[in-house]
Image (cartoon, rainbow, N blue to C red):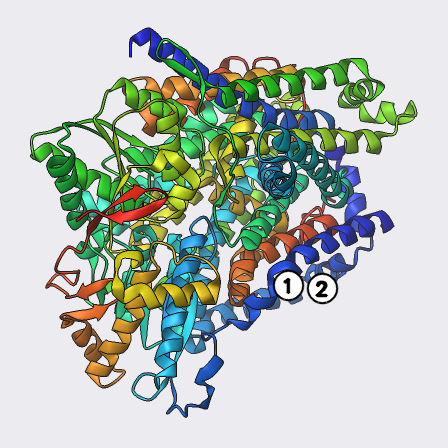
């Protein structure tokens, strides 16, 4: 018995050490944003807005970027007097990028009385929640889930403010045909809804344009060694490789492609537009081109956001935070245009969004409740930084 | 192997472990039939009245808990009754979910008609997985079931008919007596009925000839064989029964979620279901239910601590296992 | 590239990946051999090794640079630290359960895995960490087959570790005691062998080897993250079973076999990267059906 206790005590000690290392700041953030300067303003009640982001699991890193950005937006909104004179309070729902957890997080947000929802990262976790919010008539701004399936399944209460897969495939073709003039293409995705969707759309478009896709491959999430895949791709002699998923694994793939002596061009999708791609891949990333959603670095309007974000969180904003940030401001804009917190009125206002100026550019919503105009740009990795290709 | 000796297990149970005291007292209490049935009746009534005051979130969590109870009771037949290790149980659940998903969305089947097909395909999957593997030693069985679980998931991810990585979307909600089931309290009752059914079947199986045969095999395989029990056949029955539970649960899961994708059927899912069964108490229906409830409720209760919740869950799991290795509410051997 | 070049290059790829699998599979097999536990936390030990190594490297790189010397120092440090972590985990979580039902200790291992994985996730904020070293892509070429010096050194280091392990197990008295305990724990206790100490040593060695693999992975791939141990842990477990779980040479062979199978699966038409894991698992199942104890496993009757 005493031996049992000994072991347990040792374990608990070890664990509490880990807990203390990081416990502090976590607790305070719930549920609202950072309070700070907003305290003197007298608000006329509260408006709760739910955030749907992955805070645990393998996608947690992107989720936290987005949460930070949205809370920053909330703080700014509150500092300027809130929404309709009410204080904006954010409630985070952890989707863990998993369909079941997402559904549960979504119902939790609905039950806690949120007026609207900003968020939805990864199409797989977003799709099953669409109906949860639709049934409760809660408006949603989806910043980062661009499987075209969302357009098909959208029950009408949600708008997508990121460019769609069609837009991105179009941009990719522009790069392959217009700038690189390549013929044989290899496409690699990561076996999740989003990257598979983009890979398939690109493949269809490329073949329709009369070119050849010589390899259509997949990398399993969490694997590190792609050398066999690199050899297999090389043996099919593609002129270019297009990676449609996220930066972390993309960096490994790029590095291993170059290490394995692949000489052709490499392009990556918008999930890879983080500066971390270059940090991890090093010199191998030189010359890689990204079909990207507009990134904060090249947007004059985003300069302030960038600086504030770095000052607040001591890190780069990551690939999706600008859209998340815009999503929050757009929601505020829509609620004020609606003039009330009524679900139908906000949904109507969201759908009527035209020429909303965010830090990532102009947002106009088309009839399919997605972004009307492609806002994709081409970025090239040069000297460890993304440079816009005009 | 001293570890398998039931006598050692029994000694563990009788130790005055403090967290176990409570359940031991519960035992005494539930020993009395009248008290037992009143407690169960009270639980059922509570479950029935919950929807009248709870909000949707609470109902969602309960529905999810019921769903895991069904899965855990199914796995319990394999692990608890027959003593076979299974690390790929999510495969059966996937078979059921995809069967319903594909038949309703691509072939226009009525949901209720897909259930016999779910059962059929689960049986086939159970036989395919069980057939070649049941002669293996338990730890080899572990990797083979894990392998089948992964094969099922990867196949679902790669095939066209399963919708690839995005999975199946827009699965129709079922109709029942002319009413469309789509709200959370509909599914709450639907899964509750399934739970009662699953408990009933589990209970009957445990006390049947089949259940006793499984017990023999679990306790002493060679002796069971010597007594004339065809051990491979009975093990296969256990697999198939477990598969059917998983398959049916999967069918209902598909219509509740309306969207299913391969990421639901990861190894982690199988590991969590197994975890609930062992944590609760293998072979004991009440124990398994407690395990499933803990698995679902714990992370929900601790949603507030954000990314720390799974860490805390792991710590609590360790503490429980160290103090009560036989599970929270284990079977008692007479 | 000619077919022969492709074959050679895939052989190299497979062996290199396989040697990682082997190093981690060794830990699985050693622990299984001695206390019959499938230690599901082992993949996370590998991950912890990589992170401890990265922290150590960030300290020593200021003094000796992030070249081979720096890497070696941090590797030794990480092996010791993570070896001790392994012993602590064994002492706290597994030892109280040695006489409990087998499945309980398996679940405890899953619990340890959850705790390790989530602690690192919380501590790193779920970020990928770049594992920056001064090593380049330079190497030797055999025709179209390219092998970097880093790859060569990693394979040599793996081989050195395995040879030392074999020497340790066959020549020292601790190694002898390990083998004896694997055969009959109770008899060993009666013979005066300090069984708990030997089990602790086994955990130390297994964890240290996984830590070594973790650092090598960091150096080779250039980035580490909190879930890197999950997939690799499962694969290493598979490798250990292919080789015959409990058998040390079996784990080495199993790792290489699995690495080669994956490389072959990726290259072969109609399998490719999409189906390579299905290919590897199918071969595993077929192998077990025809040789139920793996390549080098011994036949023994036993129940759960």
Whole-percent x, y for residue B57 in the image: 42, 69
Instruction: Write the residue at 79% across / 55% down.
Output: B17
- Quick one: SS at disc 1? helix
Position of A192 with respect to B76 (left or right) is left
Marks 1,2: beta carbons within 8 A: yes
Residue C192: numbered disc:
none
Q: Tag 1, which chain?
A: B
**In this view of the protein, can residue A109 be seen by the observer?**
no
Whole-percent x, y for residue C79 in the image: 68, 33
* Classed neighbour count for the residue bearing mark 2: other residues with Cα under 10 Å, few (<14), some (14–19), many (≥20): some
Residue B29: numbered disc:
2
Relative to C115, say whether C299 is above or below. above
Position of C148 with respect to A349 (left or right) is right
Q: Which residue is identified by label 1? A: B36
Position of B310 with respect to B118 (left or right) is right
* Classed neighbour count for the residue bearing mark 1: other residues with Cα under 10 Å, few (<14), some (14–19), many (≥20): some
């Amino acid at each position: 018995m005493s031996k049992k206790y000994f072991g347990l005590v040792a374990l608990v000690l070890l664990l509490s050490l880990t807990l203390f290392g990081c416990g502090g700041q976590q607790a305070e953030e719930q549920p609202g944003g950072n309070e700070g300067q907003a305290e003197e303003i007298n608000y006329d009640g509260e408006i709760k807005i739910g955030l749907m982001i992955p805070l645990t699991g393998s996608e947690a890193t992107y989720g936290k970027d987005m949460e930070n950005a949205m809370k920053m937006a909330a703080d700014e909104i509150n500092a300027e007097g809130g929404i309709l004179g009410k204080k904006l309070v954010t409630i985070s729902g952890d989707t863990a990028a998993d369909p079941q957890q997402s559904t549960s997080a979504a119902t939790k947000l609905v039950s806690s009385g949120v007026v609207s929802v900003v968020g939805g990262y990864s199409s797989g976790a977003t799709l099953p929640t669409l109906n949860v919010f639709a049934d409760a008539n809660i408006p949603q701004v989806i910043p980062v889930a661009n499987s075209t399936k969302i357009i098909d399944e959208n029950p009408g209460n949600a708008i997508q403010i990121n460019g769609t897969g069609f837009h991105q495939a179009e941009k990719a073709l522009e790069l392959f045909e217009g700038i690189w003039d390549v013929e044989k293409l290899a496409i690699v995705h990561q076996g999740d809804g989003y990257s598979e969707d983009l890979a398939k759309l690109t493949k269809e478009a490329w073949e329709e344009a009369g070119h050849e896709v010589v390899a259509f491959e997949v990398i399993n999430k969490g694997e590190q060694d792609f050398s066999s895949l690199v050899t297999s791709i090389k043996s099919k002699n593609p002129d270019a490789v297009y990676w449609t998923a996220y930066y972390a694994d993309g960096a490994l793939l790029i590095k291993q492609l170059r290490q394995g002596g692949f000489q052709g061009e490499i392009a990556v999708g918008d999930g890879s537009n983080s500066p971390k791609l270059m940090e991890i891949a090093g010199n191998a990333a030189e010359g890689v081109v990204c079909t990207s959603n507009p990134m904060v670095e090249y947007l004059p309007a985003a300069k302030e956001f960038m600086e504030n974000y770095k000052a607040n969180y001591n890190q780069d904003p990551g690939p999706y935070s600008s859209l998340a940030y815009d999503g929050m401001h757009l929601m505020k804009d829509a609620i004020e245009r609606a003039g009330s917190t009524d679900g139908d009125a906000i949904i109507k206002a969201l759908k009527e969004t035209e020429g909303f100026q965010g830090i990532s550019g102009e947002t106009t919503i088309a009839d399919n409740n997605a972004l009307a105009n492609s806002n994709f740009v081409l970025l090239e990795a040069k000297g460890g930084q993304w440079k816009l290709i005009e | 192997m001293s570890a398998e000796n039931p006598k050692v297990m029994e000694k563990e149970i009788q130790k005055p472990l403090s967290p176990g005291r409570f359940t031991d007292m519960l035992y005494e209490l539930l020993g009395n039939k009248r008290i037992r049935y009143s407690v169960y009746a009270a639980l059922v009534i509570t479950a029935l009245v919950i929807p009248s005051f709870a909000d949707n979130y609470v109902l969602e969590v309960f529905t999810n808990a019921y769903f895991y109870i069904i899965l855990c009771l199914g796995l319990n037949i394999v692990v608890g009754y027959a003593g076979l290790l299974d690390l790929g149980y999510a495969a059966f659940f996937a078979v059921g979910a995809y069967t319903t998903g594909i038949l309703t969305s691509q072939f226009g089947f009525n949901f209720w008609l897909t259930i016999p097909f779910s059962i059929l395909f689960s049986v086939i999957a159970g036989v395919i997985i069980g057939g070649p593997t049941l002669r293996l030693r338990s730890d080899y069985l572990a990797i083979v079931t894990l392998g089948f679980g992964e094969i099922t998931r990867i196949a679902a991810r790669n095939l066209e008919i399963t919708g690839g990585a995005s999975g199946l979307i827009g699965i129709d909600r079922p109709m029942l007596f002319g009413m469309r089931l789509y709200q959370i309290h509909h599914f709450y009752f639907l899964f509750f009925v399934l739970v009662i059914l699953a408990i009933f079947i589990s209970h009957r199986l445990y006390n049947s000839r089949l259940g006793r045969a499984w017990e023999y095999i679990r306790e002493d395989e060679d002796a069971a064989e010597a007594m004339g029990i065809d051990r491979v056949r009975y093990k296969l029955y256990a697999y198939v029964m477990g598969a059917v539970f998983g398959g049916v649960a999967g069918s209902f899961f598909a219509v509740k979620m309306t969207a299913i994708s391969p990421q639901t059927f990861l190894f982690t899912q199988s590991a969590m279901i197994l975890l609930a069964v062992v944590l609760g108490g293998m072979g004991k229906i009440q124990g398994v239910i407690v395990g499933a409830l803990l698995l679902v409720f714990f992370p929900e209760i601790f949603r507030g601590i954000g990314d720390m919740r799974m860490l805390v869950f792991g710590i609590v799991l360790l503490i429980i296992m160290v103090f009560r290795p036989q599970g929270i509410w284990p079977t008692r051997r007479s | 590239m000619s077919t022969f070049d492709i074959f050679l290059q895939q052989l190299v790829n497979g062996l290199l990946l396989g040697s990682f699998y082997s190093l981690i599979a060794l830990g699985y097999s050693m622990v299984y051999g001695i206390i019959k536990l499938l230690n599901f936390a082992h993949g996370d030990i590998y991950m912890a090794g990589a992170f401890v190594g990265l922290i150590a490297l960030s300290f020593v790189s200021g003094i000796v640079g992030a070249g081979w010397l720096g890497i070696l120092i941090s590797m030794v440090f990480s092996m010791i630290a993570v070896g001790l972590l392994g012993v602590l985990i064994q002492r706290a979580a597994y030892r109280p359960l040695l006489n409990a039902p087998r499945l309980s200790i398996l679940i405890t291992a899953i619990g340890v895995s959850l705790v390790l994985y989530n602690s690192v996730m919380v501590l790193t904020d779920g970020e990928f960490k770049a594992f920056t070293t001064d090593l380049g892509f330079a190497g030797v070429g055999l025709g179209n087959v390219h092998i970097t010096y880093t790859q060569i050194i990693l394979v040599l280091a793996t081989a050195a570790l395995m040879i030392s392990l074999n020497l340790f197990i066959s020549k020292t008295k601790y190694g002898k005691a390990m083998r004896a305990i694997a055969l009959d724990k109770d008899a060993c206790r009666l013979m005066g062998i300090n069984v708990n100490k030997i089990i602790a040593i086994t955990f130390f060695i297994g964890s240290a080897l996984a830590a070594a693999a973790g650092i090598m992975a960091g150096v080779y791939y250039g980035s580490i993250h909190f879930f890197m141990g999950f997939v690799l842990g499962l694969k290493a477990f598979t490798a250990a079973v292919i080789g015959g779980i409990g058998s040390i040479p079996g784990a080495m062979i199993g790792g290489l076999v699995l690495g080669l199978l994956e490389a072959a699966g990726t290259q072969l038409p109609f399998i490719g990267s999409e189906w390579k894991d299905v290919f590897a698992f199918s071969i595993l199942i077929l192998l077990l059906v025809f040789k139920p104890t793996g390549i080098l496993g011994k036949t023994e009757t036993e129940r759960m």
